[in-house]
Image: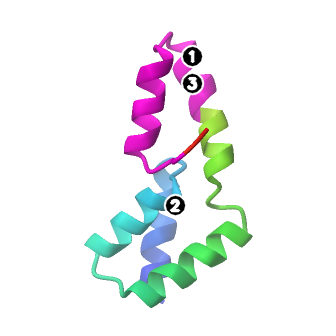
Amino acid sequence: MEIRNEALRYLSNRPRTVSEMRDHLLKKGGSSEEIEKVIEDFIQCRYLDDVKYTEMYLRYALGKRKALYRIKYELQQKGVKEF
């Protein structure tokens, strides 16, 4: 499954949100059905977890002394709806 391999490669650099993964795989030419199946599998395996990603990003951003409104904006840009 080529899309699955691309998804694994994309995750190897750093953690990603579900939205980032979906956008990346769409750009790589995956079909919606394939992409949703891979995302479902990755969520079940906990390779993708927006809550965990948000927690990690908050620790990082607060350590860099970023303002909360900027953190919220950056998370929204990454596809995280609420935190």
Give the answer, above or below, for where 30 lies relative to 58.
below
Give the labeled residue for mark 1. 62
Q: Quadrant of residue 59?
A: top right
Give residue 18's mark.
2
Residue 26 on image: x %, y %: 32, 74
Give the secondary structure at mark 2.
Answer: helix
Give the secondary structure at mark 3.
Answer: helix
Marks 1 & 3, CB-CB < 8 Å contact: yes
Q: Tell me which label, 1 or 2, sits earlier in the chain.
A: 2
Marks 1 & 2, CB-CB < 8 Å contact: no
* Cα–Cα gap, marks 1 and 3: 6 Å
Q: Quadrant of residue 23?
A: bottom left
Give the answer, above or below, for where 60 lies relative to 54.
above
Residue type marked 3? Tyr
Give the answer, above or below, for where 13 lies relative to 26.
above
| Image position of 70 (left or right of 56) | left
Q: Give the residues in magenta.
A: 57-81
Give the secondary structure at mark 1.
Answer: helix
> What residue is at 46 percent from the left and 89 percent from the top?
33
Give the labeled residue for mark 3. 60
Give residue 24's mark.
none
| Rendering colour mode | rainbow
